[in-house]
Image (spheres, rainbow, N blue to C red):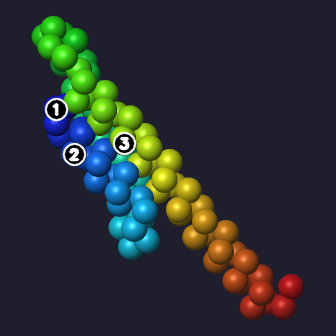
Amino acid sequence: MGIAGLILGILAAIGGWIPGINYIAWLIAIIGIIVSSIGMKNAKASGESAGLAIAGLVLSIIGLVIALSGLLCLLVCAGALAGAAAGW
């Protein structure tokens, strides 16, 4: 589960910067957070290292922040464009 969380975290962190993929990167990041936390719980239960799961969790959180900030910038720009078109 740690490897899957890490891969999803990497995809979310990279996808947050790409405008077309930005719309689904937040969903990938949320799934990465869930999978990484399950991986951390399983690693603690079995006594193994949770390093990959922690890295996946961190990258998923970073990807979520990047994706949501890109989405916020898109909404602000769309609002400014709509305001300019309305003659404000």
Task: Check the picture and name the quadrant holding the N terminus.
Answer: top left
In this picture, residue 86 sits left or right of residue 25: right
Residue bearing mark 2: 7
Residue 70 in the image: above or below residue 52: below
Please say whether residue 31 is visible from this viewpoint. no
N-term mark: 3 or 1: 1
Q: At 65% from the left edge and 74% from the top edge, which residue is drawn?
A: 77
Q: Residue at x 41, y 53 (%)?
A: 26
Distance CA(mark 2)–CA(mark 3): 9 Å
Q: Amino acid at mark 3?
A: Ser
The foreground one among 48 and 83 is 48
- Identified by mark 2, the residue type is Ile
Q: Earlier in the sequence, mark 2 or mark 3?
A: 2
**Visible in this render: residue 83?**
yes
| Residue depicted at 39% across the width and 68% down the height | 18
Mark drawn on residue 40: none
Measured from the top left, where is residue 47 in percent x and y?
A: 15, 8
Mark-to-mark CA distance, 1 and 2: 10 Å
Instruction: Measure how far apart labels 3 and 1 are at the Cα level.
Output: 14 Å
* Label pair 1/2, CB-CB below 8 angstroms: no
Q: Which residue does the numbered mark 3 point to in the structure image?
A: 60
Question: Which quarter of the image is occupied by the C terminus?
Answer: bottom right
